[in-house]
Image (cartoon, grey):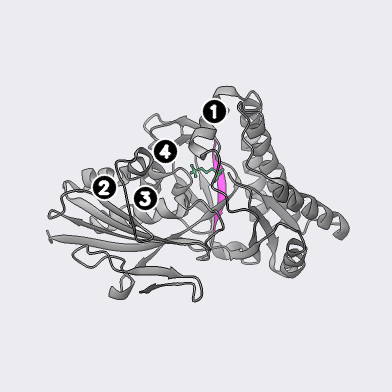
Amino acid sequence: MKNYLRATFEATANIAVVKYWGKRDEKLILPTNSNLSFTMDDKLKTRTTVVFSEDFKEDELYLNGQKIDLNDQSASERMIQLDLVRKSAGFNHKARVASINCFPTAAGFASSASGMAALACSSATAANLKLSNKELSILARRGSGSACRSVLGGFVQWHRGKNEDGSDSYASEIFPASHWKELVNVIAVVDSEKKKTSSRSGMKQTILTSKLFEKRLQTINETIEDTIRAVEKRDFESFAKLIIKESNNMHAVMLDTYPPIMYLNDNSRKVIDKIIELNENKGKMIAGYTFDAGPNAHVYTIENNLEVVKETLKEIPGVKELIVCRIGNGPKQLTNESEHLLTVEGKVKDMFFDEKTKSIISR
Ligand code: PMV
């Protein structure tokens, strides 16, 4: 075996259209319901390099150039993937991990899906594990639930699964990115504040306190089937209506949680009003919104209506920035020496995300 094992991947965010909100197993990160998302293109991506070596004394993580304290519980929980990879590879080498989020600053985006997917791909590859997409998705899931969907491109379903060990809870591609090329996601950035409630603790509280949540679970499989059918037929009108109702449903359940969870703010609600008004004025659905655990709006539309949707969103006071994402193909391995964030011996290179050129460059 070589002394140093290295791999670098980029993975992108995904935006759920039928949401994951609730775990049936906290430790294994198993969801209470199946869910659906589109993987985005590289407007929102994370690049991660992993080096394993028997020379390293302990695991080290560098995020956007800063060393992260792995004694911090939430950081170390997310690094569980390294232990799982070591176990499968049959070695005990410690790892050095460097990760850069290529997200617009001040957008307040959660980068856990792209980050944990990039970590799964790069750690498994560095350790020479030849994992199937299913195994890779299960590995990413252990870092963060939604990350299990970002190891694939296109339209993705995370299957709830029934097994207690989580072996059947993974994501698979339903349609490739090429299936609906006209679909666009316009992110209306309205806020940059840090999340008040983490999705982890919020979901837990919902299960403990919300009666409405049981009702949500009774109808969610029907919503999934209807949404898959709408995407299959590229039926935007049905798709938009379904995702609006589904997002509202999740946020209603959040509000029904005690203490209540409110991720939407006044600016989010202005976006909601404007989108409903736009569709009414046009006499058909040309845009559909969805919100995750934060106030930024993800507005799905199709290419022909992109300009009018952008103009509408730009007019809303409180919308600071628009990010236009198209559907992406999933993680990508990078093999050029200049692209790795760590040298072959695991030394951290002085690299950063340059907002002007939208690329990762050396300082
Ligand atoms: O994987 P987490 O813990 O970041 O949870 C994400 C949950 C939502 O973004 C609210 C919904 C989803 O399905 O992505």
Point out the image quarter for the N terminus: bottom left
Q: Nearer the viewer, residue 15 or 112?
A: 112
Given the image, on which type of amino acid does mark 3 rest?
Leu
Q: Which mark is residue 85?
A: 2
Vertically, is 255 above or below 9?
Answer: above
Give percent across and percent down for residue 89. Answer: 20, 48
Q: Which mark is residue 205?
A: 1
Secondary structure of the residue carrying tag 4 is: loop
Secondary structure of the residue carrying tag 3 is: helix
Whether residue 32 appears in this view of the structure is no
Residue corresponding to mark 3: 136
Point out the image quarter for the C terminus: bottom left
Give the alpha-carbon distance from disc 1 to disc 4, as whole Å: 25 Å
Give the alpha-carbon distance from disc 3 to disc 4, as whole Å: 12 Å
- Name which of mark 2 and mark 3 comes first in the sequence: 2
Do the residues bearing badges 2 and 3 touch, measured as CB atoms within 8 Å? no
Whether residue 169 appears in this view of the structure is yes
Given the image, on which type of amino acid does mark 1 rest?
Gln
Secondary structure of the residue carrying tag 1 is: helix
| Foreground tag (2 vs 1) | 1
- Name which of mark 3 and mark 4 comes first in the sequence: 3
Q: Which span of residues is magenta-colored?
A: 32-39
Quadrant position of residue 274: bottom right
Q: Nearer the viewer, residue 180 or 107?
A: 107
Give the alpha-carbon distance from disc 2 to disc 4, as whole Å: 19 Å
Q: Residues within 10 Å of mark 2 (few under 14, many from 20)?
A: many
Quadrant position of residue 75: top left
